[in-house]
Protein backbone atom coordinates (compact mmCIF):
# COMPACT_ATOMS: atom_id res chain seq x y z
CA UNK A 1 0.00 0.00 0.00
CA UNK A 2 1.39 3.37 -0.98
CA UNK A 3 1.44 6.66 0.90
CA UNK A 4 -1.26 8.41 -1.16
CA UNK A 5 -1.44 12.09 -0.29
CA UNK A 6 -4.66 12.59 -2.27
CA UNK A 7 -6.49 9.91 -0.29
CA UNK A 8 -5.06 11.27 2.97
CA UNK A 9 -6.26 14.75 2.02
CA UNK A 10 -9.73 13.43 1.15
CA UNK A 11 -10.02 11.65 4.50
CA UNK A 12 -8.95 14.80 6.35
CA UNK A 13 -11.50 16.88 4.43
CA UNK A 14 -14.30 14.38 5.11
CA UNK A 15 -13.47 14.23 8.81
CA UNK A 16 -13.26 18.03 9.07
CA UNK A 17 -16.58 18.51 7.31
CA UNK A 18 -18.16 15.73 9.36
CA UNK A 19 -17.37 17.74 12.45
CA UNK A 20 -18.77 20.92 10.93
CA UNK A 21 -15.40 22.62 10.85
CA UNK A 22 -14.17 25.01 8.17
CA UNK A 23 -10.70 24.88 6.69
CA UNK A 24 -9.91 28.16 8.44
CA UNK A 25 -10.99 26.75 11.82
CA UNK A 26 -8.93 23.56 11.50
CA UNK A 27 -5.94 25.47 10.13
CA UNK A 28 -6.07 27.83 13.13
CA UNK A 29 -6.11 24.87 15.54
CA UNK A 30 -3.12 23.39 13.72
CA UNK A 31 -1.29 26.75 13.66
CA UNK A 32 -0.94 26.61 9.88
CA UNK A 33 -2.42 28.79 7.15
CA UNK A 34 -5.72 27.81 5.56
CA UNK A 35 -3.92 27.83 2.20
CA UNK A 36 -1.51 25.19 3.54
CA UNK A 37 -4.44 23.07 4.76
CA UNK A 38 -6.18 23.46 1.39
CA UNK A 39 -3.06 22.08 -0.33
CA UNK A 40 -3.03 19.13 2.08
CA UNK A 41 -6.72 18.38 1.51
CA UNK A 42 -6.36 18.50 -2.28
CA UNK A 43 -3.28 16.27 -2.23
CA UNK A 44 -1.08 18.99 -3.62
CA UNK A 45 1.15 18.82 -0.53
CA UNK A 46 1.74 16.00 1.92
CA UNK A 47 1.38 16.80 5.62
CA UNK A 48 4.32 16.37 7.99
CA UNK A 49 4.09 13.66 10.63
CA UNK A 50 3.64 16.37 13.28
CA UNK A 51 0.62 17.76 11.43
CA UNK A 52 -0.79 14.26 10.91
CA UNK A 53 -0.53 13.55 14.64
CA UNK A 54 -2.26 16.83 15.50
CA UNK A 55 -5.02 16.23 12.94
CA UNK A 56 -5.65 12.73 14.28
CA UNK A 57 -5.90 14.05 17.84
CA UNK A 58 -8.14 17.00 16.90
CA UNK A 59 -10.49 14.92 14.76
CA UNK A 60 -10.54 11.94 17.13
CA UNK A 61 -9.24 9.26 14.78
CA UNK A 62 -6.15 7.07 14.55
CA UNK A 63 -3.16 7.74 12.34
CA UNK A 64 -3.93 4.39 10.71
CA UNK A 65 -7.25 5.77 9.56
CA UNK A 66 -5.84 9.03 8.21
CA UNK A 67 -2.87 7.43 6.46
CA UNK A 68 -4.24 4.03 5.39
CA UNK A 69 -8.02 4.37 5.72
CA UNK A 70 -8.11 1.54 8.27
CA UNK A 71 -10.48 1.73 11.20
CA UNK A 72 -9.78 -0.12 14.41
CA UNK A 73 -12.01 -3.03 15.39
CA UNK A 74 -13.24 -1.13 18.45
CA UNK A 75 -14.29 1.81 16.25
CA UNK A 76 -16.19 -0.53 13.94
CA UNK A 77 -17.86 -2.28 16.89
CA UNK A 78 -18.91 1.11 18.32
CA UNK A 79 -20.36 2.17 14.98
CA UNK A 80 -22.28 -1.10 14.76
CA UNK A 81 -23.64 -0.68 18.31
CA UNK A 82 -24.69 2.90 17.51
CA UNK A 83 -26.45 1.69 14.37
CA UNK A 84 -28.28 -1.06 16.25
CA UNK A 85 -29.44 1.46 18.87
CA UNK A 86 -30.66 3.83 16.18
CA UNK A 87 -32.56 1.06 14.40
CA UNK A 88 -34.08 -0.12 17.68
CA UNK A 89 -35.30 3.41 18.39
CA UNK A 90 -36.85 3.61 14.91
CA UNK A 91 -38.63 0.25 15.40
CA UNK A 92 -40.12 1.51 18.68
CA UNK A 93 -41.46 4.60 16.90
CA UNK A 94 -43.28 2.46 14.30
Image (cartoon, rainbow, N blue to C red):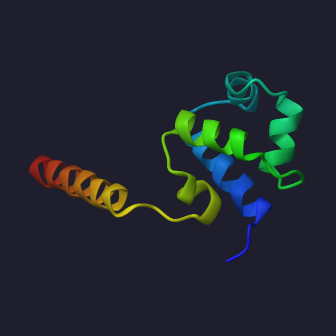
Q: How many marks?
A: 0
Residue at x-position 70% and y-position 28%: 30
- Of 94 and 76, which appears nearest the observer? 76
Q: In the rendered view, would you say 77 is above or below 89?
A: below
Quadrant in the rendering for residue 7: bottom right
Does residue 30 appear to the left or right of 69 in the view shown?
A: right
Residue at x-position 54% and y-position 58%: 65
Q: Is residue 47 visible?
A: yes
Does residue 69 appear to the left or right of 73 in the view shown?
A: right
Residue at x-position 71% and y-position 39%: 51
Does residue 55 appear to the left or right of 32 in the view shown?
A: left
Q: Is residue 19 visible?
A: no
Q: Position of residue 60 (x, y in %)?
A: 48, 40
Residue that extends furthest to the front in the rendered view of this protein: 50
Q: Position of residue 13 (x, y in %)?
A: 68, 46
- Of 1 and 11, which appears nearest the observer? 1
Does residue 15 appear to the left or right of 84 in the view shown?
A: right
Q: Position of residue 47 (x, y in %)?
A: 78, 47
- Of 94 and 8, which appears nearest the observer? 8
- Of 86 and 11, which appears nearest the observer? 11
Q: Position of residue 40 (x, y in %)?
A: 81, 47
Residue at x-position 51% and y-position 65%: 70
Q: In the rendered view, would you say 10 is above or below 28?
A: below
Q: Quadrant of the N terminus?
A: bottom right
Quadrant in the rendering for residue 11: bottom right
Residue that extends furthest to the bottom in the rendered view of this protein: 1
Residue that extends furthest to the left in the rendered view of this protein: 92
Amino acid sequence: MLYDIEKIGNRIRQLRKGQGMTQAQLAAKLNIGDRHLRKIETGEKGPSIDILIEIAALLGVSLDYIIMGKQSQSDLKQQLCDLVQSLSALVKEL
